[in-house]
Image (cartoon, helix red, strand yellow):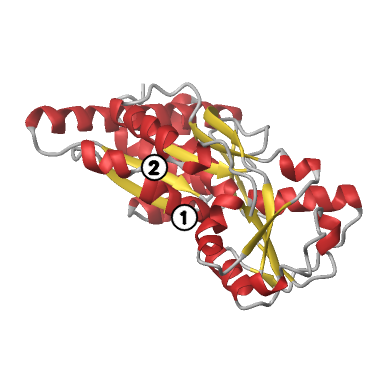
Amino acid sequence: MFGRDHNFLVIFAAVSRHGSLRKGAVEVGTSTSNVSRAISAAEERLGVQFIERTPSGISLTDAGRVLRDHAMQQIEADRRLRAKLERVSGRSGAVVRLRCGEGFLADLVEQGLRDVIRAHPDIGLVVDIGATQDIVEAVDTGNADIGIAYALPETAAVRRIATTKQPLCAIVPTDHRTEVANCTILEDFQSIEMALLPKTHGVRQLVEQCADRHGVILRPTLTSGSIAALLHFVRAGHGVTFLPRFSAEVQRQQGEAYIVELRNPTLRTATTTLFVRPQRRLPKAVETVLSCLQDGMQSFAKPKWGA
């Protein structure tokens, strides 16, 4: 029914993704009134309601959610078709889009993508960073082919390709090493100045779960979505932050930070996850990149203990 109306499906997918007619219109480069008319015309033609208008935007009805899923599947099918046509015509190779947390970037680019870049020059790569919630949403909506996240909630509706235990650690200034020699749990650090990621990040959510369980009050001196900012906070000697080991390994090797393994069960069982959208038929290029990431990234290797 909508198979040939690609433009309408693109519009509806954009509106669904943003929960807003205006933002959806901006994404596809048209006016809000054009978007509204297109959806109203489809609703009238089919005798069903796809959206409900609210003061804060729009929400999807049951029929709207069915249409959204169909739109995403159709857009993905069209994308695969274009990629195949480009390959057979020799014009270009496939493009694989990845989204991950900032803490994965060094490991991803230097290790995980090394074999892709060397052995598969026909595969183009797009890497974006985001918070855990943003990464899951990007994969779910088709804006990313592959997601990499830390402390991914068990309820996340994704297809997990690889999950590896990577405990959360305290990252401490090197000149504080003696002071924290006997600190082994989160409670030991509550009197020290700390920098934390925002609450949209899996690391922060994990720290808060542990804090709530053990009666720890978190009062961060600095809150930032930039892991680089957190590590600068530590390097400057201001206080401590909490990250998985791989996010601060370079700083440890350069003598700029000291890593403390924490013994709280909640923090010890944290994991890194490589994932894709459920029930998606993966293009060959995506399968190739996934294999290289699993084999090459330290984030999916058995963690090395000891600071």
Q: Is residue 201 above or below residue 124?
A: below
Looking at the image, can residue 16 be seen? no
Can you give x and y, in whole percent of width and height, for residue 127 in the image?
38, 50
Looking at the image, can residue 107 be seen? yes
For residue 23, the mark is 1
Front-most of 156 and 273?
A: 273
Q: Does residue 279 appear left or right of residue 11 in this picture?
A: right
- Which residue is located at x 52 percent, y 26 percent? 66
Q: Does residue 206 appear left or right of residue 88 in this picture?
A: right
Front-most of 179 and 28?
A: 179
- Under mark 1, the amino acid is Lys
Reading the image, the residue beneath label 2 is 112
Can you give x and y, in whole percent of width and height, for residue 159 in the image?
53, 27
Can you give x and y, in whole percent of width and height, for residue 37 in the image?
42, 45
Q: Secondary structure at mark 1?
A: helix
Mark sitting earlier along the chain (2/1): 1
**Quarter of the rendering occupied by the N terminus:** top left
- Under mark 2, the amino acid is Gly
